[in-house]
Amino acid sequence: MKKQEIKELSNQELTEKLVELKKLHADLKIAHFVTPLENPLQIRKVRRTVAKLATELTNRDNQ
């Protein structure tokens, strides 16, 4: 998810997307632990997207 796409989302959409991606990240980690994923870089991509969303929410709260 690009920075511009994140900035266009509302606070509620950001929160919903953050919860959804955190669940996906946890599921990917568990799936990778049990059976190695075909593309383990998915975990990194999702983790970084979660961080971007959380950062944007924090920046909006501080303003």
Image (tube, rainbow, N blue to C red):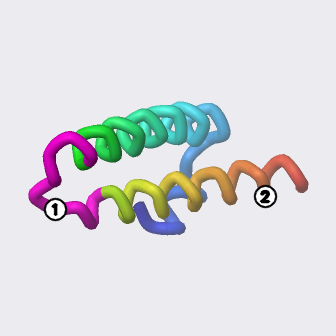
Query: Where in the figure is residue 23, as x and y percent of width and height?
Result: 42, 34
Q: Which residue is mark 1?
A: 39
Please identify the quarter of the rendering in which residue 43 is found.
Answer: bottom left
Task: Please rate how many residues cluster around mark 2, counting C-alpha atoms within 10 Å: few if below 14, some from 14 to 19, many from 20.
Answer: few
* Residue at the farthest right position: 63
Q: Tell which of 16 and 51 is nearer to you.
A: 51
Amino acid type of the residue that numbered disc 1 sits on in the rendered structure: Asn
The residue sitting at 36% across, 39% down in the picture is: 24
The count of marks equals: 2
Asked if the stretch drawn in magenta spans residue 9, the answer is no
Amino acid type of the residue that numbered disc 2 sits on in the rendered structure: Asn
Earlier residue among tags 1 and 2: 1
Q: Which residue is mark 2?
A: 59
Query: Where in the figure is residue 55, as x and y percent of width and height?
Result: 68, 58
The residue sitting at 34% across, 46% down in the picture is: 29
Query: Where in the figure is residue 3, as x and y percent of width and height?
Result: 52, 67
The residue sitting at 52% across, 66% down in the picture is: 4
Task: Please rate how many residues cluster around mark 1, counting C-alpha atoms within 10 Å: few if below 14, some from 14 to 19, many from 20.
Answer: few
Mark 1–mark 2 contact, CB under 8 Å? Answer: no
Please identify the quarter of the rendering in which residue 41 is found.
Answer: bottom left
Which stretch is magenta?
Answer: 33-42
